[in-house]
Amino acid sequence: MQTILPFFIMLVIAGAFTSALAVYVFKHRKVPGVFPFILLMVCASIWSLGYAMELYSLTFESKLFWLNVKVTGAILAPVFWLALVLEYSGRKSWVQGKRLFYWCVIPLLAILLIWTNEFHHLIRLDARLIEFNAITYIEITRTSLSWLFFSYGYMNIFLCLIILLDGLFSKGYYWQQFVILLISLLLPLGSDAANMMGFLYPFNITPLLFIPSGLLIAWGLYRYKLFDIQPIARDKVIDMMESGILVVNTDKQIVDYNIRAAQIIDNEQDEQGGSMSWYVVSEVLKKWPKWAAAYDCPEESSFEIKMSQKGGEQYYRVRTNPLLDSREVLVGYLSIIDDISDQKLKEQELTHLATSDSLTGIANRRYYLELSDKIFSAARRYNHKLSLLMLDLDNFKKINDTYGHRTGDLLLKKFVVVCHDIIRSSDVFGRIGGEEFAITLPETGLTEAFYAAKRIRQKVADVKLDIGRGEMISFTVSIGVAVKVPDDRCFEDILLRADNALYEAKIERNMVKIQGG
């Protein structure tokens, strides 16, 4: 016992130190990244104290119990090492939700099998007491399954190494932080590897090396704010951005994104707690092919997209820029997605105000003429039919004077509703003056236009307008009809003939008259 006493004391000190370090860091848990570190220190403490008690115990049963305790800490430590490194490298989503469960299945299964080994012997074929240099310890014969579990732990550690080395060479400004994590990882890893090869037999000093490793990481947490800066700052800064951020590699796979981007895209994977990472953009953005196509060309692009979401239609501006490395080689794309719905709404409101009649909501004179000019130009170029109806409400001034402007406004609105029930969506309907309206009918000849005018006239004549107090009034409309002829050079030519026809109709009132064509 005297031979192992110094090593026993060092193990107890290591266990106490790592436990105290976990408690101390927990009190300062507002610093990002501390929880994986706390769990790692707890595992180191279990490992150290379990090892100490294994050496100190005298009976086979007690040594076997503490051996199981020691191995429990040793098996879980690589998992929390990986969680620590993933959080620092910005890959926290790798071990969140269901993925965390999948990642822990193997070590948890190994622990279960270790503690129940006497019933199945899947981990240890046998265990026996061996004396070496006056030290009594347990020697075991491992099964292939046992080696498989230990290999899983080493796989996690080597994955940590790969991630840290990649960060060391690609994030030069933060090289001190990566070096801290690398040294902290290599100290216990090197010792454990040496122990596996028999160099430190019969002692394993790996638990002791968690003291300098834990000190280094703790120092990095507070000295360099290890998890406050890139890439963990991304979780706080980029995820708080109002703009969506999407990073795509040259294989057209999504490699990074922030919360806002996930909300905008509304991807089913994220709704179920999953991730868009490593999905190809053509799948995630299949509703917006223009967006997906932006990653086919290594050039800057900017465009707008419309999305139908729970709150209604939303508009976004997507700006995509190629990402080049120091050698000007394309390595991916960065997309910034800005919500421009409010801007679009204001634009639409301004457009509506500029182009619509404030009372009836149909096109005002200026906008009506603008649209009709375009229709006329197309009809003239391709020799298509075009007709025009000019409409004027009969005795409107008298109705206004008799019943008031409120009744006049009700009458104008009712008239527009009646016309909308008859005309087509392709027709252009506008208010030309006070009680004067015009309807441009594309792809419509004289006969069809005449019958459309007659239907409107008849429908208006049948209207009974309730003006309140139980009083109903009727009103009529006079309509002039004109069609495009080969000699017409502009839309105003048709408008003039329709106006002349309307003048003739107004003489008799409640009539439809044709002029020209």
Image (cartoon, helix red, strand yellow):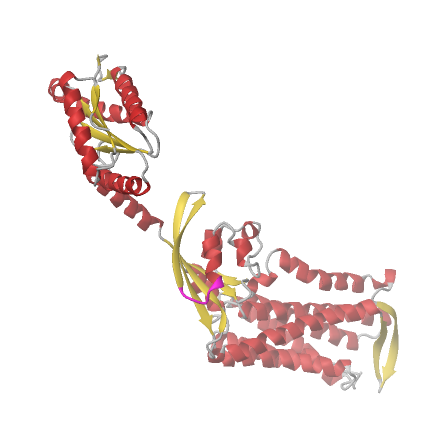
State the residue lying farthest toward the front.
Answer: 486
Give the prevailing secondary structure in the magenta stretch.
loop
Residue 306: where, in percent of width, then height? 41, 48
Examine the rendered structure and indicate whether residue 267 appears above or below residue 453.
below
Q: Nearer the viewer, residue 187 or 252?
A: 252
Q: Is residue 297 magenta?
A: yes
Q: Is residue 484 left or right of residue 324?
A: left
Q: Nearer the viewer, residue 111 or 22?
A: 111
Examine the rendered structure and indicate whether residue 485 appears above or below residue 288.
above
Q: Which residues are magenta?
A: 296-300
* Rendered residue at 70%/82% (across/down): 191
Q: Quadrant of the C terminus?
A: top left
Q: Nearer the viewer, residue 139 or 338?
A: 338
Residue 509: where, in percent of width, then height? 17, 17
Q: Is residue 210 left or right of residue 116?
A: left
Residue 502 figure quarter: top left
Q: Nearer the viewer, residue 21 or 199?
A: 199
* Rendered residue at 66%/67% (across/down): 79
Residue 241: where, in percent of width, then height? 41, 60
Q: Is residue 182 left or right of residue 426?
A: right
Residue 258: where, in percent of width, then height? 47, 60
Q: Is residue 186 left or right of residue 282?
A: right
* Residue 70 showing in the rendered view: no
Q: Quadrant of the N terminus?
A: bottom right
* Residue 397 showing in the rendered view: yes
Residue 3 figure quarter: bottom right
* Rendered residue at 76%/68% (across/down): 149
